Amino acid sequence: MTTTQTTVAGMPRTAAELLSRAQELAPILRERAAEIEQHRQLPDDLVELLRGSGVFRMCLDRDWGGLELTSMEQTQVVEALAYGDASAAWCGVIGANTGIYSRFVDQTAAKEMFPTPDLIMAGLLQPSGRAERVPGGYRLSGRWSFGSGIGHSDWVTSGAFVFQDGEPYASPDGSNPHESRQFLVPRAQVGTIDNWYTTGLCGSGSCDYTISDVFVPEEHSYTFETAQGRPGPLAQPDAFTRSMCGVPLGVARAALDHARGIALTRIDRMTGTAWSDSFRVQVTLAECEADYNATRNGVYASMTRQWEVLAAGGTLDDLTPDERAASPLAWVHSFRTSRSIVNRLYDLLQTWSISRTSPMDRWLRDTTTMCQHLIAQDRIMQSAGAYLVGGKPEFGIALGIV
């Protein structure tokens, strides 16, 4: 388990202060982006910079020393980090989800597990492991993929199917013929496999990990069916997915600003025409800006509407079908449109993009890789589409359906 902790003194107290910290970190992350990639996980000092900035406490309840940012405020922070480096932002948003998961765990146990507000969670929610019921809890074993940030985490949450006496365990109420749950294990009891060699998000350290016959107390397991903490907009099954779209949006903004900066000074060597006067450059930049603005506005509009309903004491069921589906649709669209923007700008800059020293090369690889994540896959589109026509969503949690 990570032993280095930050103190409360000097920590941000508001969303605006945390956003300012994230914006100050961005140029540092940009400067060290190549090092982050080569390291294949965040260097220890950058982890502590993120921890010291307050990023990992942004989802935690204020009563527990957290900032309890709205989903919109969280996304702005993630955008600011991604403007510097996508891998750092990816680890930031995942590590900050400690504050989301803590709302679904037995609250007495959660306060013992998270005695300070800056502890980091990692892990895969998909039930890839096996948990055998034993007196007082479970014996957990398995191998999970894509443990982003696991190397610097304090706790690991992992999904597993439950068995009893070697047989699939059915939920007592009959709602599930084979129950699955989430299990929290200290990082020290988790093994990692050094297999994170990828196209992009190279510095996220999203390697496979293993847990072998570890005892997990009952109170260290949870499901997303019922929140245990104080009700609110963040005590919802979909809360951990909302601000991830800040990563592609932040990268797209960085790429747009980079391309516009080049267009201000570059002269076409063949024609002598300033890029600022080039029809091709002007149209490409305008089209990309239009797509970025529409996509980002769609994310924040759907997110804000959802938050308004939940903050007023409503539930996700109080949203219209169109409003409820709008949020996951906007997430997927932000990933895919950001990749499209980066692709077009990469082509616009032509051979100035292809060097490994060019940030365009990294942004192309990062957006390509992040679009393979579940949150950007057709399964989310199917789930939203199925919900709109009364069908069965494959990944209902994206809609807050467990």
Image (cartoon, rainbow, N blue to C red):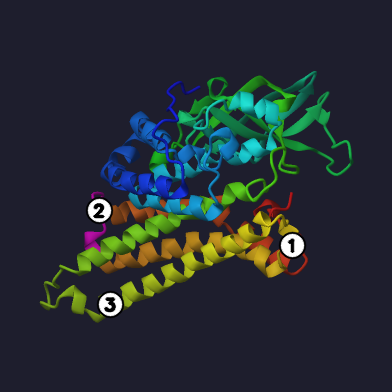
Residue 213 position within the rendered picture, expressed as x and y whole percent measured from the top left:
66, 20
Disc 3 and disc 2: Cα gap in Å?
Answer: 21 Å
**Can residue 199 be seen here?**
no
Tell me the element at label 3. Answer: helix
Residue 356 lies within the magenta run: yes
Precedes in sequence: disc 3 or disc 1: 3
Residue identifier under label 1: 318
Residue identifier under label 2: 358
Disc 1 and disc 2: Cα gap in Å?
Answer: 47 Å
Q: Residue at x 67, y 56 (%)?
A: 310
Precedes in sequence: disc 1 or disc 2: 1
Query: Is 234 placed left or right of 343 in the picture?
Result: right
Relative vertical location of residue 118 with respect to residue 303 in this rendering, above or below = above
Sort mark 3 into few (<14), some (14-19) or many (20+) by Cα contacts within 10 Å. Answer: some
Q: How many marks?
A: 3
Nearer-the-camera pick, 400 or 171: 400
Nearer-the-camera pick, 379 or 295: 295
Relative vertical location of residue 221 with respect to residue 368 in this rendering, above or below = above
Query: Is 300 placed left or right of 7 in the picture?
Result: right
Q: Residue at x 19, y 69 (%)?
A: 264
Disc 3 and disc 1: Cα gap in Å?
Answer: 44 Å
- The part of the chain drawn in magenta is 350-357
Magenta stretch: dominant SS? Answer: loop
Residue identifier under label 3: 282
